[in-house]
Image (cartoon, rainbow, N blue to C red):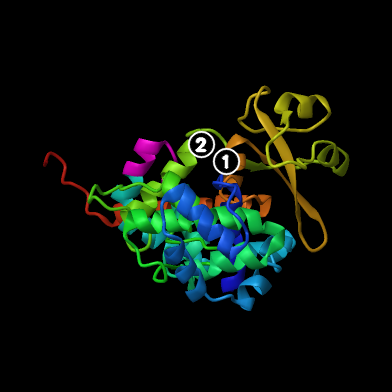
Amino acid sequence: MKNIIATALLGLSCLAASAGGAPTEPKAFANYMQQKHGFTVDYIQMALDKAEKRQSILDAISRPAEGKDWYQYRPIFIQQERIKQGVKFYAEHRALLERAEKQYQVPAEIITAIIGVETKYGRIQGSYPVIDAISTLAFHYPKRGSFFAGELEQYFVLAREQGWKLDEPKGSYAGAMGMGQFIPTSYRHYAVDFDDDGKVNLFSNTADAIGSVANYFSVHGWRLGQPVAEFVDADKVIATKFKNDKLKPQFTIGQMKKAGLNYQGQANDSDIAGIYHYKQKNRYDYWLGFHNFYVITRYNRSPLYAMAVYQLSQEIKAEYDVQQQKKLAKQPAVAKGKS
């Protein structure tokens, strides 16, 4: 389960723009860090010598959860326990979530669902020392070595900025940290001090975690009040013709309707969307994904992940609303003529 969750977090790291240029060989990396950031070679080399190469990290990165079919992937994240915990999280932190929604124009339920999918609302943040994870992948995983060398560079800078001991922060096998699982570049670029205490803490400060996830979505273009995804009853021919092979939606609703799609939703003909295919055991489900759906994939490059986040958010919001209605129904009516 930890490997599956960590793999989902890797998508976040795939999206953040790493610094680039950092060498994938330890001695060259140490020299680079001295020249570019003013660290001493001895400091970097000593830290890298202490970092542990972990085979379990190399094994985990080769087993992406996003390689599963939808009917296998969905139950990992859409389950009653996670929904129940999400409703509790929403209720406990309603003021923070609503403030983040107002400030960053990102729905409270989407913020909640991201934290729920990533770490079960902070419960599972990863157990790998971040420096072990990123250095293992930077120096021993050639397929993505350059990317992770850039993240290792950012980690050293981040640790200096935050006053961390290099071997203390723990995270996923991909080096993602905190309740929202930000890799070093994302932590430096998108994390915010949402409670104004002078620190940015995504590990145990729920306010900062909520604000930072909201900020990430805001920067990547979330449009409050716009659709995310809609189930569509399309035949195979139309679903194939307008299949979204790229993450970004490519077609207009008008184009699809003109080709014969029986669309009865609220989107305008000029709205951009695409049809995403989700494999069930004996069929495919087809969903229209809009701009906001694409924004979710900026957190993790996977339509599976984006749909899991969206559906979890809707389950949480629906259950929360039901509970609120029940509470209101139990309140005694105000006597007529009384205030």
Q: Is residue 238 a member of the stretch shown in magenta?
A: no
User: Which residue is denoted by mark 1 in the rendering?
Assistant: 295
x and y, in percent, of residue 236 in the image: 86, 44
Label 1 and label 2: CA atoms lie apart by 6 Å
Tell me: 194 left or right of 129: left
Give the secondary structure at mark 1.
helix
Q: Percent from the top left, x then y, of residue 121?
A: 43, 63
Q: Which amino acid, mark 1?
A: Val
Q: Which contiguous range is marked in magenta?
A: 99-109
Would you identify the image quadrant in which residue 67 lies? bottom right
Considering every residue shown, the one lying at the far left of the view is 338
Residue lying at 80% horizontally and 24% vertically, measured from the top left:
258
Neighbours of disc 1 within 10 Å: few (<14), some (14-19), many (20+): many
Vertical side of 42 occupied by 327: above or below: above
Task: Looking at this view, name the residue that lies furthest to the right.
Answer: 237
Residue located at (72% from left, 37% from top): 274
Mark 2 surroundings within 10 Å by alpha-carbon count, few (fewer than 14), some (14 through 19), many (20 or more): many
Residue 174 percent across, percent down from the top left: 57, 63
Kindly indicate whether the residue at mark 2 contacts the one at mark 1 (C-beta within 8 angstroms): yes
Position of residue 299 relative to residue 294, above or below, is below
Vertical arrangement, residue 312 with respect to residue 62, above or below:
above
In this rendering, would 110 be left or right of 245? left
State the residue in front, 284 or 64.
Answer: 64
**Image quarter (top left, top right, bottom left or bottom right) of the N terminus:** bottom right
The residue lying toward the viewer, choosing from 48 and 117, is: 48
Please tell me how many numbered marks the rendered image carries: 2
Q: Which residue is mark 2?
A: 222
- Magenta region, main secondary structure: helix
